[in-house]
Amino acid sequence: MATRTAFAPTTDQMVNDNLSKKANALWLTPLSEADEGNFDPKVVQEIYTNELVKSKFNQQRVLLLEFSRYLENYLWPGVNDSNCSNAVVISVASLVNIKFHQAVPAWDVFKQRPTYFKLLFKRVMDLVLDDDLPMKQRTILLKFLGHCYRSLEVQTIRAEVTKTLSLSFWKNLLPGRLEQILSTQPKLKKRFKSMIKKEKKLDAAALETTQFYNTFLPKLINKFCLMIVAETISGDILDYCQRFLDWMIDLDSSLPCRRWFNAFLLDSNLVVRCKKSNLYGQDDVFTQLVDTLYMYCSFEIDDVTGEALNKQAMLARHYYRLGQLQKCIYTNFKDNAALQKVALSSVAKIDRREALTKYLGELSKEELTRLSNLLNLHVLPTDSKEIVLEMIVAYHEQRPSQLDAINALPLYPTEGLLWDDNLTKTAHFIKDECLALPKLNLQFLTMHDYLLRNFNLFHLESAYEIRQDIENAVHRVRPWAKEDDTCGFSGWARMALPVQSFTVVEVAKPKIGESRPSRVRADMIIAVDLNKNIKTEWESLRKHDVCFLLTIQPTGAGDKNDKGEKIPFQSRYNILVRGCEIEGMLDDDGRVIEEGPDPKPQISGHLRTYRVYLDTNQYQSDMEGVLKHGMKDPYESFNLIVRRKPKENNFKAVLNTITDLMNTECVVPEWLHNVLLGYGNPDSAHYKTLARTINDLDWNDTFLTYEHLQSSFVNHSVSAADDAEKIGPPFKLDFSADDSEITVTSHKIPSRGPYSHVQPKRNSIKFTPTQIEAIRSGMQPGLTMVVGPPGTGKTDVAVQIISNIYHNFPEQRTLIVTHSNQALNQLFEKIMHLDIDERHLLRLGHGEEELETDKNFSRYGRVDYILNKRLQLLTEVGKLQGSLGVPGEVSYTCETACHFFLYQVLSRWEKYEHQVKESKSLDELNTLFPFNEFFSSAQPLFKGSDFADDWEVAEGCFRYIRHIFTQLEEFRAFELLRSGLDRSRYLLIKSAKIIAMTCTHAALKRKDLVELDFKYDNILMEESAQILEIETFIPLLLQNPRDGYNRLKRWIMIGDHHQLPPVVQNLAFQKFSNMEQSLFTRFVRLGVPTVQLDAQGRCRKTICDLFRWRYRALNELPHVAARMEYQMPNPGFNFDYQLIDVNNHKESEPNPFFYQNLGEAEYCTALFMYMRLLGYPSEKITILTTYNGQKHLIRDVIRTRCGNHPLVGWPDKITTVDRFQGQQNDYIILSLVRTRAVGHLRDVRRLVVALSRARLGLYVFGKKSLFSNCFELSNSFRLLNARPNSLLLYPEERYPAGSQALNRAKPKVINSMEEMHAFVYNKFVQGMQEHEEQRRQQMKQEEALQKQQTQAEEEIRKDAVQEKEMMIGAEQKPVDINFEVTPPVEAISKETTVKESAPKKTKSKIPTAPTKAESKKATTPEKPESKEDTAPEKTDCIKATAPESKEETGPEKPESKEDTTPEKTEIVKDSEAPEKMEIVKESAPENTESEKDIETPEKPESKEDTTPEKTEIVKDSEAPEKMEIVKESAPENTESEKDIETPEKPESKEDTTPEKTESEKDSEAPEKMEIVKESAPEKPESEKDIETPEKPESKEDTAPEKTDCIKATAPESKEETGPEKPESKEDTAPEKTDCIKATAPESKEETGPEKPESKEDTTPEKTESEKDSETPEKMDTSETTTPKEASVEQKDEAVEEKKDDDEDEKMES
């Protein structure tokens, strides 16, 4: 993309050019007034003739003179009255024009010699009127004049411009018109007469000069009128005419000029003469410029007062003119019957152009001329009848309203606008040419004018971006014409899908007074048979998202013609475009799926139906075309839908908002109005100028110490009201009326209660004096502008301003607006760490999920927080009620709680306060305190040493209580409002005090916020210099005015106009229309006072030097010199920043503007790998580039080279410089990409951003010869080139830096990318070897440690068993447990059931396998016949059944799979029913011994004993209500275990784990069971296969290899318990269990042996032969496999994970 400096010369060209040599000889140093004799006019003439005229004022030649400072050092210092020749004047004008083109200050040099500017300006006027001067030179002078008239903010310029446009300029009007105007302005009439008297007293020379200035513009206009009627017009004349009209528009759209100029413009009938010229209708730019000038001639404003006129005032003006016409005709044309009809007709009948043309067209030229003279219209003798008639008609017709035209304009661009020639012309704007576009200058006529220009520009810019997206999508889907004339698609696009069906389903009736439908809705069907990610994107289309419906048909033309030239898009396709807005996706029932916290329903099939809104204006226009002109219905042919990225698709919301603002009374604060329009004193909105300054404010925690306060106001006299040595923060400051003295008062924040969590948070940043001034300005009413260079703490200043406003004005509400979600989140995260109540914070928009906090600050998240907080506070109220002994239920609602506070709490406190203050007794203060029991957890409350201190404690406790009820009072509304929507709205408009949103969200939701009556008092805008002007303006008007006044009190804007501006893709809009100028930048240009922060704390001093030159004064904060990280060198590098020359790799451009450089991408990747191998954390490294193409290429290279390797991985971010603005990282790798041209890095603002992102290290890759030759970048690249351009490394060093960096040897030099790759590869191999060795050493250490832990835990377990036995003997008689199979080890405790992990080397419990007669579920895992045959390898959850109470207890068989869970069970019977049953799972360390050939010392009694966990089940007399799972470490368990063996053979598989023993006879099911988990140590990975003696008869009889979760169903209540059939096929027992989920079964009348209810209970138990077959690496579960499976290799992780997922799905079913 071309830039302003696309034709700028390189440094080499400048050095070798003759002009540069002449510059070195003549103006290397600037001339002073004493050196005027050294100025040689011949040199100027020679340069003018040979360099400028011969080259036809080539931009490169002019830029070369500009870069050599020809104007500043030689030309202007030498100008005087005697040598101000044509060459001097035109040379100066050319250099000023090029300065404006380059967006650099142009008028500073003239401020030094303002007297000579008067001479220059007069010479320019003389020459531009000179017909002998070539048109090219006259055009240059005309451009210079245009820049002068647009720079009225400069006093030197304004002094000369106002001489040409003042009250005396009205002497050029016709006498009748002048008298008519002065009759309505008595004050001006008086001034005009006084001016005439003064002019008569002037001498001849002064009078001649005055007349020259007064007649300059009329003469120039007359020459222009003669020029446009010529039959042949050359290119130079056309350029002159276009620029002349552009200048006229600027004059008429600037109030200081329009006040005097517009009357003459109407009097001269310039617009009419242009419309009747040959150029009108032939040249598009000329035609559009004439139309724009015509619109401004009759703009809705009073030319003299500058007041905006409403529709009624404009109608009154129109009717007055028609009345004058009728009076004139009636009086002077009584004999003309046709004209008498006009005189006697109603106004409504003749106010249209057609009627006036019909009646007046019958008159002759003489009659029309006579009528024009009577109406004070200026007619020339050479004017034809058509021109005279047009003058009369144009003056008296009712002109169309701009507002009506905008209201009837479709907001979505159509194919007519998207591929309009004028819009296409802007896409190729590379020269300083004239275009018919509105410009965002410094000043605007009215708010309507301001909005109108922004609307037109934003509409065109969005159309340009949309066209690019549509062309890209169509190119990717590759349309082709079928034989039946329909269109097919052979390609695929992420952002486009074919439309399966489109049907208009609703056309609502128009509203009263309108003709368009009030709503048009349609249903659209698309197929989303795509991959998961893209399908999700399409299904995630939200309400208000904008899409585009296309009807596309290929024409058969190829991409290029025979000459190889690209054929335009509109020539290759017949295309129709209509926009739509998503309402929502329809569910299977045809209803719109509403957005909300609930998950969206799953829709079957791959077809999706969307309900969309259509543009009503466009639909009406289309239907009129169908009905009146027989056009084809466009809504029946759509075949493609295109969506856009959400961040780039907010144009409709912005346009809608602008339209709404234009249709309503736009009220901005009175103190801001003139500054916003660019008029008046720029200081008028500053707090020092406003009369509302607040001198006494609480600065809260802004200052850390009194010394910090004193150092912050070095220009003030600071005095402390108290003892300066004892004074401490927080401080209150009282400024004197003359702002010279400050009185400081210290105050103590009252205690908020006895708990630490309620104490106020404190600021820890020591702000600099400039930051303090910015904070002070932000606290005061008015406009505050803070310029923050990189790293100067803009966000910290913003947060402190918000905090101080919050504490000083608690009733006020503050709105925070930023450009990006990231900046908003950074600001919001810092706000959360200040002393601001969380309930007052609210974050709007879709970026809230990116906040680095677990708290949800969205609207619904805040509502949930308030409801939960309400319950917590009501619980506190209940606690307080109990402590006071107040009967009844007072903690039921907020209302009852507030009554309780009023009648019970407050009365007790007042009584206590009265008694204690009278007695002043420390004893009574403590003993009478009514809330001692409530604050029992904070005892002792009172120290008893000092009455004042203890009384402060008591008051703090009461403040704590009162704050509870204050919050409950605020929460009462949330009790009354029942729906989440109502609650969220109340939160937004009433409860929240600090509301944060992006400017995009403000534009999207402006209408909704106004309808909700949203109010706020202050606005703080971060990243203000990055926000478009209109997007900055919209947040000012998110509320309705109150009694005609805006309640806004403060507007704080923080930004940096030296960094990147708002993103505008179209170069014409960006440069010519100045759309990239933010409101922040415009205010800076206007001279609005700013506070520039002057100390950075981000980067090293050396790195800051690279961009320090761009700012007026930028130093370092103290910590940059103090912290070691800024002093130590970067490990492995010789320099902290370096430019690495990559000159042997060229750029490529696979797509337009998609620049890539593979050599640089590989080099950057190699450096990143090198840093990671040295130990640099990946999150501290960011790779930046200047182009999107290179960003994607680097990502691909890293993905290929190292992205998935654990030693290297991915950097923190790989992105572009533009995207990374506002962020930082420790180390930045920067790729400049370009090798043929500098590209858009020539914009110094982009360079500043690129060089200021690194804190500790910056490594730039680029072509040295190219970027070093760029003049704009020379200040930075001079420093970069001062260091070697080859990478210098110390590969033996390691991160982080230490003493190794102090004793450095000779660095290793890397001269090329290939050498770096080879070096990094070798280092990578070495690193892998070292990593493997470290891993082996670590494994040995872990094995030794695990062995020690296993031995220690075994000892602890034995002690626990003994202690359990003692407890059982003391509390309970022995219980005979009659098992029919070998039971698990069981121990009995009183209240807790503890499941702990035993060492991996444990006793193997190998029960005898059941026979076929006893169970059909004998297991052999050889050949599973279905997916369900295989139990999961890893299960995280066991669902177990908690039994209800039983009347009789006895030995039972297990009812479910839980009974076979591999855990030891301890059963404790207690006389009282426990309310909770806790199952504590303890972690066991890994067994470090080899498992091979290790025998188990004891024979296991049951399969459960193979688990490294034990379970204690507590039975009580009452049924449990809850089950909680508690996982603890093994050493914490001190309870004993008792192994119980039963020699009997089980009758059923389920008997392997009994549910109850006889010890539970009198116990009822517990009411609650709590299961709490703690992490268990890592377990070994493999086991040997174990044989099972029998073959299963069921498909599901295979035992799982590895199981973490066992699932069991809860049996229903039964009259008798007995054998039952299994109910599920999923009951295969797992081998590894991490947690148990239990559900309570229903009660049973009798208990007895039961058959299993599920097939999961069929896990085979181990036999004696399995004892030695288990490896010690994994003893978590019993594993049953056949010998055949022992030889099978272990399955990979992917297969195991798949099994886990399958098993989880089965369990959930």
Image (spheres, rainbow, N blue to C red):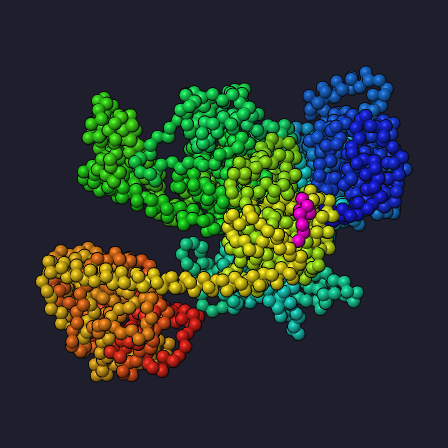
Q: Is residue 1221 left or right of residue 1692?
A: right
Check the image and report above or below for 343 versus 236. Answer: above
The part of the chain drawn in magenta is: 1279-1286
As for residue 492 lying within the magenta part, the answer is: no
Residue closer to the observer: 1018 or 740? 740
Q: Position of residue 868 (x, y in %)?
A: 33, 47
| Residue located 29% across and 83% down the image | 1591
Residue projecting furthest to the left: 1373
Q: Position of residue 265 (x, y in %)?
A: 76, 34
Q: Is residue 575 left or right of residue 885?
A: right
Residue closer to the observer: 783 or 985? 783
Q: Position of residue 568 (x, y in %)?
A: 72, 60
Report which quarter residue 870 is drawn in: top left
Q: Is residue 1138 visible?
A: yes
| Residue located 81% across and 35% down the image | 27
- Which quadrant does the C terminus fall into? bottom left
Q: Position of residue 973 (x, y in %)?
A: 35, 41
What secondary structure prevails in the magenta region? loop
Residue closer to the observer: 1559 or 846? 1559
Q: Is residue 1232 visible?
A: no
Residue closer to the observer: 1513 or 1090? 1513
Check the image and report above or below for 31 versus 434. Answer: above
Report which quarter residue 276 is drawn in: top right
Report the number of discs.
0
| Residue located 51% across and 36% down the image | 797
Q: Is residue 300 left or right of residue 1639?
A: right
Report which quarter residue 344 is drawn in: top right
Residue projecting furthest to the top: 201
| Residue located 70% across and 41% down the image | 103
